[in-house]
Amino acid sequence: MNIYGIKRSDLEQYFIDINEKKFKALQVFEWLYTHRVDSFYKMTNIKKELQERLDKDFSFDMIKIAKKQEDKLVKKYLFKLFDGNFVEAVLMQHDYGLSVCVSSEVGCNMSCAFCESGRLKKVRNLGAYEMVEQILLIEKDINKRISSVVIMGIGEPLDNYDNVLDFIKIINDAKGIAIGARHITLSTCGIIPKIKELANETLQINLALSLHAPNDELRSRIMPINRSYKLNELIDTINEYILKTNRRVTIEYVMLGEVNDKEEYAKELASLLKGMNVYVNLIPYNETNHLEFKRSSKDQIMKFYDILKKNGINVTIRKEFGSKIDAACGQLRSKEVEL
Ligand code: SAH
């Protein structure tokens, strides 16, 4: 097992199982995440025999940075995994700190029509350690700590639920990477049973829903997941989530020129979301070579924005970071593997 994929509570159980004190888990976590050592033999408050045992049971194997691409406020990383697969992460510098967008799967099965990542069907889930290591490697590369994490890279996080939850618990652990839950955002295309499950986890993380259309007809056309989980039921589920967690939910809406950006859709969206504790994030589409979708004009984005605003919906337009350096989901990866 890779040590970076183990939650503190599981490590405590491991120590109990081998007749050791459970507080050793805390010591190991401090070595791993405060001191960032890469061997049990450097953990000087752990006795030799136990170091040997740990070394036998856990590995420190790291994924590798295969490529970096950067622009002023953004740095994109391509990682090579042990089995030769690639995933990406993006580091962004905001006025409030550094954030990283991590991938959760190799490929994606959701097949959203406009998304580059989904051109490769899911090959496998990422292990929690492969998500934790994306962050550790970026922090090491820039020699700084990051302050927030968004799970919005390649993959559908709720389709890799257990590993993503372990990942969240490890980075959120005060003795782990210590990223506050309110600084962690999980973005989903809307897998209803898993949103319900997440609502019961009592995590204070942010949930973002990729909505992208205000009705079933249009949404099913661009997001096949909508054929399984219809819009009304999805909105009910989000309302339940808000009620249970008392957290505001982000609604993502990617602006696809002449597809979902008409004024009538803005009105429809406003009435769909009326009274909900949500805010809408309009995302200028990142065009890719392989897909025919176009970005909405600035003018159209502003019109859409104004209609939402006038109808009492909280709305922002996403700041753009990566379009110059292929930061749209999956673009760097798909160049590397020549899809
Ligand atoms: N599967 C998850 C998380 C990964 S996608 C989800 O669907 O939310 C992260 C966000 O980027 C989603 O809102 C997705 O619809 C959007 N997206 C995908 N391709 C994009 C592109 N080329 N330009 C802008 N946003 C894109």
Image: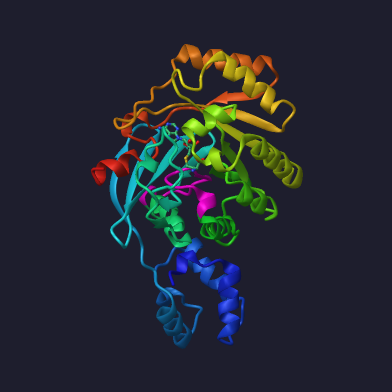
Residue 67 in the image: above or below residue 59: above
Query: Residue at horizontal 59%, vertical 59%?
Result: 173
Query: Residue at horizontal 57%, vertical 42%?
Result: 190
What colour scheme governs how the chains and residues are painted in the rendered image of this protein?
A: rainbow
Spot occupied by residue 299 in the image (x, y as percentages of width and height): 48, 11
Spot occupied by residue 261 in the image (x, y as percentages of width and height): 51, 19
Residue 157 belongs to magenta span? yes
Residue 77 in the image: above or below residue 59: above
Q: Nearer the viewer, residue 174 or 35?
A: 174
Q: Which residues are magenta?
A: 141-159
Q: Nearer the viewer, residue 128 or 217?
A: 217
Spot occupied by residue 277 in the image (x, y as percentages of width and height): 71, 33
* Left-right relation of 317 to 326: right
Q: Nearer the viewer, residue 135 or 190?
A: 190
* Left-right relation of 141 to 252: left
Farthest residue in the left direction? 338
* Left-right relation of 247 to 103: right
Query: Residue at horizontal 38%, vertical 25%?
Result: 293
Spot occupied by residue 5 in the image (x, y as percentages of width and height): 48, 65
Q: Quadrant of residue 175?
A: bottom right
Residue 189 visible? The answer is: no
Q: Quadrant of residue 59?
A: bottom left
Residue 228 visible? The answer is: yes
Q: Nearer the viewer, residue 265 or 188?
A: 265
Where is the C terminus found, in terms of image quarters? top left
